[in-house]
Image (cartoon, grey):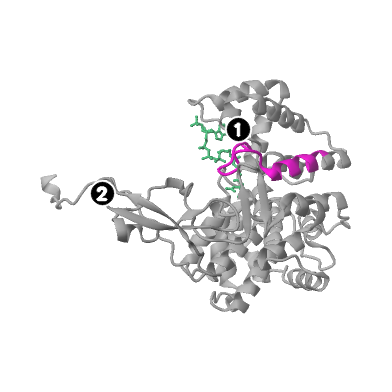
Amino acid sequence: MTEPKSNENVTVVDNTTGKQTTFPLLSGTAGAKVIDIRNLYKDLGYFTFDPGYTATGSCQSAITYIDGDEGILLYRGYPIEQLAEKSDFMEVCHLLLFGELPDKKQKDQFVWDITHHTMVHDQISNFFRGFRRDAHPMAVVCGVVGALSAFYHDSTDINDPWHRKVASYRLIAKMPTIAAMAYKYSVGQPFVYPSNTLDYAANFLRMCFAVPAEEYEVNPIVAKALDLIFILHADHEQNASASTVRLAGSTGANPFACIAAGCAALWGPSHGGANEEVLKMLNQIGDKNKVGDWVKKAKDPDDPFRLFGFGHRVYKNHDPRANVIRKAAHQVLNELGVNDPLLEVAIELEKIALEDEYFVKRRLYPNVDFYSGIMLKAMGFPTSMFTALFAVGRTVGWIAQWNELIEDPSQKINRPRQLYTGPTSRDYIPVDKR
Ligand code: SDX
């Protein structure tokens, strides 16, 4: 990765001193240009102020491009709609990790490598027995993923490209196994080991739903729908959890610890936890005739209720993934013969919200989480597993971003500054004088 070049600049005039300072304007291959302010404090003595980093580029990246106004999402330049229709999750993993779709030989080798890393060290199963059975699966996933660094010492040297590759493959391969074990543990069923005869999504379904007492037949419709869900969740530029992984990675922490940090950030209801909240919300609404009342609550500034699955920090038009998932949800429910009244509630909610001035003015459209939960429910997953499934899909994006960070010569330990508003210096007062 090379330092971005620039032949343009912007000049900042400090009206308090009249001083003018020029900063380089950097251009990428698409999207907004960025003002390189790395010398701002040195030149002007000021920091920028951008709570939530909504206007701040934290890095240069060649992995995923989002145009929020146009509703565009590209993985290494390929539109998400084309990948959803024509590719599969293993190809998308190779694309995100290495920058190119694999040829037949590369794909077979990559799939073989991932498949042969799906088992976890058998002692890892002991960690699960330390959790309560009713622990949230994400609590278990966060804990067990972090524990991987206690087992795979031979792939934690971040400066060794071979270590980075092995750790990347291990995380992509073992995340479904760990998520499935978290599910099995929560329902009191024995763990099901991965089978090397199955593809990624089918393997995950079998590890979740097979029981030793009988043969398990993977439903190809469900497996294909799950593969699609993994593709749509694979990466999303510098979202909150990817930025968490990068920040942890910037300290030199090992990849397993960084991905555990990403899992923790994803769990939040404003982020990856939203798909679980969407189902709770649809159940709360319960009947499509009550949708209007709940939309009123969502619009009421004094009411904390928000419509989960609506709105997005970047997409201020449509989330292209929501369009793909909406179509797939209808198709999967029809093919499975599932008639879920919550789907009718969701369709009515989307219809009312998209016509309502409050949502139109704030450009709040359904996001990827709005329909994914309905599909996952139809596939047999409990609501509590939805975010763990999101983590399974997103692990490849996190690890691709982490590798890009480690290989970026300009990256250093992330250390934001602040606007200090606390007490200025004052002397200690002995307790008998307070
Ligand atoms: C994901 O970043 C990513 O890329 C994330 C993700 C990924 O792939 O990694 O795409 C995955 O996290 C999708 C988002 C899932 N979250 C939800 O569905 C939770 C519900 N959505 C909101 O919490 C909210 O929309 C956010 C957090 C997603 C985005 O927040 P923003 O951009 O900061 O929007 P905002 O909070 O500034 O809201 C702007 C206005 C506010 O009203 P006003 O103050 O202008 O009167 O819109 C309102 C908000 O109150 N608003 C909502 C709303 N979301 C925002 N009102 C009702 N329901 C909502 N869902």
Measured Cα–Cα span from mark 2 to mark 1: 48 Å
Q: Is residue 198 left or right of residue 349?
A: right
Left or right position of 184 against 308? right
Label 2 sits on a secondary structure element that is loop
> Does 39 sit above or below residue 51?
below
Q: Which residue is drawn at 81% across and 62% down?
A: 199
Q: Where is residue 150 in the image (x, y as percent from the top left)?
A: 56, 71
Location of ligand 1 given as a quarter of the image: top right
Residue 329 drawn at (x, y percent): 78, 41
> Residue 198 placed where, x, y %?
83, 63
The yes-or-no answer for disc 1 within 8 Å of ligand 1 is yes
Quick check: marks 2 and 1 in contact, CB under 8 Å? no
Q: In this rendering, which labeled residue sits more in front, label 2 or label 1?
A: 2
Q: SS at mark 1?
A: loop
Quadrant location of the C terminus in the rendered image? top left
Residue lying at the far left of the rendered structure? 433
- Residue 350 position, x and y percent, is 69, 30
Residue topped by disc 2:
18
Q: Which of 263 and 103 is in front in this view?
A: 103
In this picture, which residue range is highlighted in magenta?
307-330
Counting other residues with Cα less than 10 Å from the Cα at mark 2, is it few (<14), some (14-19), or many (20 or more)? few
Q: Earlier in the sequence, mark 2 or mark 1?
A: 2
| Residue 408 sits above or below residue 427 on the image | below
Q: Which residue is drawn at 57% across and 26% down?
A: 358
Q: Mark 1 points at which residue?
A: 307
Q: How crowded is mark 1: few (under 14 residues within 10 Å), some or many (20 or more)?
A: many
Question: Does the segment drawn in magenta span residue 325?
Answer: yes
Q: In this view, does 130 lie to the left or right of 379?
A: left
